Image: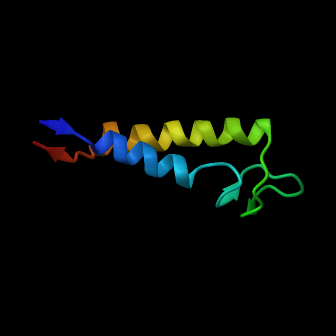
Amino acid sequence: MTDWGPVVVAVVMFIVLSPGLLFQLPARNRVMEFGNMYTSGISILVHAVLYFCIYTILIVAIGIHIRTQ
C-alpha cells in the first residue's frame, strides 16, 4: 500500500507558494504584492519557511493520507 498524501500536498503547495506566482512576501515596494512574477532572495527564504511550516502542519499534525493499492 502506497501513501500519496505527502507527495500530492508537496506538489500543490510548491505550485501555490512559488514566490511571485500568486503573491510575494516581502515584495519590492510593499510588504506583499500579488501576481508580480518577480522574486528575491529574502522572499524565497520567507516562502520556504512558510512552505515548511504549512507542510509540517498538514502532514504531521492533521495527517493527510491518500492510500492506493
Q: Estimate the x, y position of residue 48 in percent, counting from the top left.
A: 60, 37
Whether residue 69 sits left or right of residue 11 in the image: it is: left
Quadrant (top left/top right/bottom left/bottom right) for the C terminus:
top left
- Quarter that holds the N terminus: top left
Q: Is residue 1 left or right of residue 6?
A: left
Tell me which residue sits at (47%, 44%) in the image. Answer: 54
* Near-viewer residue (21 or 64): 21
* Image-quadrant location for residue 16: bottom right
Tell me: residue 3, above or below residue 28.
above
Q: Position of residue 67 (x, y in %)?
A: 16, 45
Residue at 81 percent of width and 52 percent of height: 27
Q: Is residue 67 left or right of residue 60?
A: left
Q: Residue furthest right?
A: 29
Q: Position of residue 29 (x, y in %)?
A: 89, 56
Residue sitting at x 63%, y 43%: 47
Image side of residue 17 versus residue 61, left or right:
right
Q: Is residue 48 above or below residue 30?
A: above
